[in-house]
Amino acid sequence: MATGMRLKLKTVFVLYFMVSLMGLVYALMQLGQRCDCTEHDLPKDRTISRLRGELHRLEEQMKKVEATKSPHQAPKSTPPTIFVITPTYSRFVQKAELTRLSQTFLHVPQLHWVLVEDSPHKTPLVAGLLADSGLAYTHLHTATPKERKLQDGDPSWLKPRGAEQRNEGLRWLREDRRAPQGADSQQGVVYFADDDNTYSIQLFQEMRGTQRVSVWPVGLVGGMRYERPVVEGGKVVRFHTGWRPSRPFPLDMAGFAVSLKAVLANQDACFDGNAPMGFLESSFLQGVVTMEELEPRADNCSKVLVWHTRTEKPKMKREEALQAQGLGSDNAVEV
Ligand SMILES: *[C@@H]1O[C@H](CO)[C@@H](O)[C@H](O)[C@H]1NC(C)=O
């Protein structure tokens, strides 16, 4: 009985060994069939050599195109950066205004946004908006001294707004560009863009080549359809404005840009927060340029590319009524 069992077991082992050996031999034979494999690779090889040919042809074409380019065209240098200095302050429409502005700026190449909050600290709302904006930016803040601040109910023209914030922007710019890191570090244009105006992206093309101070019309300002410098023979000779045309520079803040060079060369030029109404722009420009030097843009100041729009203050009657009942909107929702 016992020997019979042992014999059977032996047979099973032998059979198992034979089957494994056959499998191994078959696998080795498959490996050896090289001809089959090359036949499979042939179409692949053909594709590779065809693509190599194509690449070579394209490389030749590129070389030809490069050669036909005029040798005078030096490697394209980047256009001068436009530094946009924007004063802003907390209010219901702030995020809406800054969103609109930032999304206009996204269309402008080489733009650096210097956003200056009228606040004793940087607010999370503005910090978050800038971080998500996709723009190159610098976030600054400085609070307007109390005695210079407009009180609720004061008409907006009573005291100039944003003087301290624009000066803070200028201070940062002069500090940041003080040590020239290269020939290009002083190439740039400075523009003061309030957060409620409407800007055509074409305006930024117009100002990019500013040598000292460039000027253009501003729409819907000063109680008129537009204000503008009047240009004769390519020079600014006077100003079309409805109010005190005798001011040194009867220009709106949105109506001029200054070259970075001029800002750096005139370190003392700044906005006088105590300037009488309508003289804020003059207080800065007087230290930088003369009327004869103004560079008219926008087809000799015949085109309006920026509008002095004003956003209506939203009414909060119902919100306040609901708040009184403890049913006000969720403060955790940023608006
Ligand atoms: C501006 O006016 C000057 C002088 O009349 C003229 O030569 C020049 O072509 C004008 N420029 C534009 C852009 O219209």
Image (tube, helix red, strand yellow):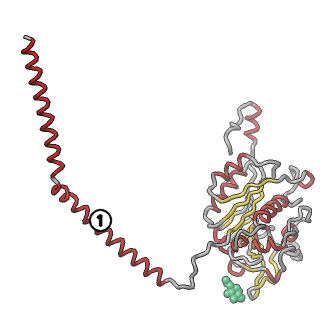
Classed neighbour count for the residue bearing mark 1: other residues with Cα under 10 Å, few (<14), some (14–19), many (≥20): few
The foreground one among 214 and 54 is 54
- Say whether residue 12 is left or right of residue 257: left
**Residue drawn at (75%, 36%) of the image:** 321
**Coordinates of residue 147 in the picture (x, y in percent):** 93, 53
- Say whether residue 27 is left or right of residue 7: right
What residue is disc 1 on?
Answer: 48
Name the quarter where the N terminus is drawn: top left
Badge 1 amino acid: Ile
The foreground one among 24 and 311 is 24
Residue 238, image quadrant: bottom right
Residue positioned most to the bottom: 233
Element marked by disc 1: helix
The foreground one among 125 and 322 is 125
Residue 162, image quadrant: bottom right
Residue 285, image quadrant: bottom right
**Coordinates of residue 272 in the picture (x, y in percent):** 89, 64
**Coordinates of residue 167 in the picture (x, y in percent):** 83, 62
Ligand 1 sits in which quadrant?
bottom right
**Coordinates of residue 263 in the picture (x, y in percent):** 80, 71
Instruction: Report the number of discs.
Output: 1
